[in-house]
Image (cartoon, rainbow, N blue to C red):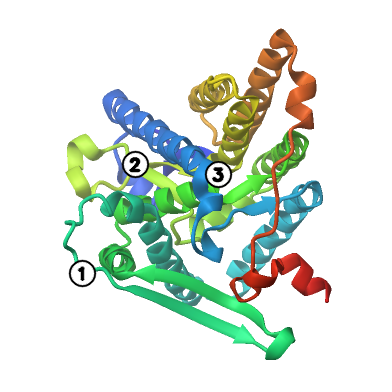
Amino acid sequence: MEQAEAHNGSVAGEAPSAGAAAARPPATPEGMALAYGSLVVMALLPIFFGALRSVSCAKGKNASDMPETITSRDAARFPIVASCTLLGLYLFFKIFSQEYINLLLSMYFFVLGILALSHTISPVMNKFFPANFPNKQYQLLFTQGSGETKEEIVNYEFDTKDLVCLAMSSVVGVWYLLRKHWIANNLFGLAFSLNGVELLHLNNVSTGCILLGGLFVYDVFWVFGTNVMVTVAKSFEAPIKLVFPQDLLEKGLEADNFAMLGLGDIVIPGIFIALLLRFDISLKKNTHTYFYTSFVAYIFGLGLTIFIMHIFKHAQPALLYLVPACIGFPLLVALAKGEVTEMFSYEENTTPKEVPGDAKEGKTELEKKEK
């Protein structure tokens, strides 16, 4: 019988309790194939569409739609920060009541999930609104200080269509909050993943290698070296993973024997794949060689993770297989094409955006802060 090892950064089955696991029949080959095949497809969707949206997201009208650039210093610190956060959560669950912690987390992810899902579906929903739809513009603006020292804290522009998307996302949020149903969990998880791939930008390939390399060590250590990640993920009731039932064919939508994939195993390789798409575009050769190469590498790495997990009957840190594949495959292509120098010299354009209040004077946020 396949035991459930649920944790962020691995693919495995997840059991709700020890008693349930003991009474549950083993998953059928058909059910397992459906579950893991669905997880692979769900992982590919936010990477593909998030990468495409990352190309144009810098042209957004809102400061919140602008990409967040990850530098080499950020990348080097990230595994340390992630480790401290993970260990902190582990200690919290050991010391305090799991019920109250998860209640706070549920409310937190309820709000974040609604906003992320609304941002995800907004471009699609805009195509379905009729031309005569009464669309009004709104602006939410918070500032600090006055005169030349005035600084924008929040400047968010939205319209009636965005409010409709927000209302639709709220329905999913209430469903998740009340039922914790796996479909609602996945809708939020997909939204988080797509937004992460779209809005988190690596400034160059070297930074991507530092980030992936650091998290490679992080994932292997916390999965194989300790039980911390497993314990946290089993206790952590939040849409931080995609799940799919292995007993869906037998129990339908009420199935409860889940296979899972942590969102970190989607977003971290995803932002590197998105960077390679933007590098492809910068070459101006009308080809997406590196993007498709890394995309195929991700499929290979994820498939290898699932295969190894079933061979050894133990949960696996997916980044152990995804990182070498996602870095190695494009690097081999660059070596074959003689474009290694171009790849590692490519730098994201991080020109600061204009501050609306100072636009007439041609000032930027950066200049404003330097005053």
Q: Amino acid at mark 2?
A: Phe
Crowding at mark 1 (Cα within 10 Å: few <14, some 14-19, many 20+): few
> Which mark is in front, 1 or 3?
1
Considering only order in the chain, which callout, 2 or 3, is on the residue closer to the N terminus?
Answer: 2
Image quarter of residue 279: top right
Give me the disc on residue 134: 1
Q: Nearer the viewer, residue 275 or 250?
A: 275
Label 1 close to label 3 by CB (< 8 Å): no
Considering only order in the chain, which callout, 3 or 1, is on the residue closer to the N terminus?
Answer: 1
Above/below status of 294 relative to 227: above
The residues tagged by marks 1 and 3 sit, at their Cα atoms, a distance apart of 37 Å
What quarter of the picture does the C terminus occupy?
bottom right
Q: Where residue 370 appears, x then y in whole percent?
A: 83, 72
Label 1 close to label 2 by CB (< 8 Å): no
Q: Nearer the viewer, residue 291 or 248?
A: 291
Give the residue at x 71% y 38%.
Answer: 208
Q: Is residue 217 left or right of residue 53?
A: right
Q: Amino acid at mark 3?
A: Val
Q: Which residue is mark 3?
A: 267
Looking at the image, the residue that sits furthest to the bottom is 146
The residues tagged by marks 3 and 2 sit, at their Cα atoms, a distance apart of 18 Å
